[in-house]
Image (cartoon, grey):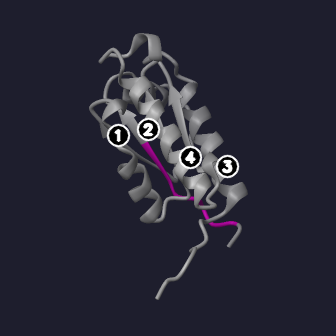
Amino acid sequence: MADAKPKIVGFCCEKHGTESVDLAIRSGEQYDASVRLVTVPCTGRVDGLHILKALEDGADAVFVLGCLEKNCYYDTGSIEGRKRVEYVRTMLSEVGIEPERVEMFNASSTMVWKFPEIASTMSQTARRLGPIEPRGDTK
């Protein structure tokens, strides 16, 4: 099943994150169609449980795309989002799951190239790592 498309979930803030995605699409930029986007008011609202649930539900990789940290619509939302992503990465590492399956990215609404670059990066990572193998006692 090496040729199977990976499942990637992206949580995007409704300001700069989603606007950069929209601009990329309107500009004709191509990106991996296996990426599924979830619009959130702010990346600071993405809880670690949301990321873990996406992985539990079959995502091979998850990313969070927010405003540039110095230009966040809600001041510190991107910083809070990054902290939560780092916490989840630590948790994954502790249970033997590759932490690079979860990443945080930042973009401004005018960065037309950023979303296709993120989608490609996460798709390559997911393909390289393959699906998450079940661990532990599955009774």
Q: Are marks 1 and 2 in contact (CB under 8 Å)?
A: yes
Res. 125 mark: 3
Q: Which residues are magenta?
A: 3-10
Q: In front: mark 1 or mark 2?
A: 2
Q: Nearer the viewer, residue 80 or 39?
A: 80
Where is mark 2, residue-wise? Answer: 84
Tell me the crowding category of disc 4: few under 14, some 14 to 19, or many 20 or more residues within 10 angstroms, Cα based. some
Where is mark 1, residue-wise? Answer: 46
Q: Specify which label sits upstream in the sequence, 1 or 3.
A: 1
Q: CA–CA distance between discs 2 and 4?
A: 10 Å
Q: In front: mark 4 or mark 3?
A: 4
Task: From this view, report whether residue 63 is shown above or below residue 18.
Answer: below
- Compared across the picture, whether 118 is left or right of 72 comes to right
Q: Amino acid at mark 1?
A: Val
Is residue 33 in the magenta section? no
Q: Quadrant of the N terminus?
A: bottom right
Tell me the crowding category of disc 2: few under 14, some 14 to 19, or many 20 or more residues within 10 angstroms, Cα based. many
Q: In front: mark 1 or mark 4?
A: 4
Q: CA–CA distance between discs 1 and 4?
A: 16 Å
Q: Specify which label sits upstream in the sequence, 2 or 4.
A: 2
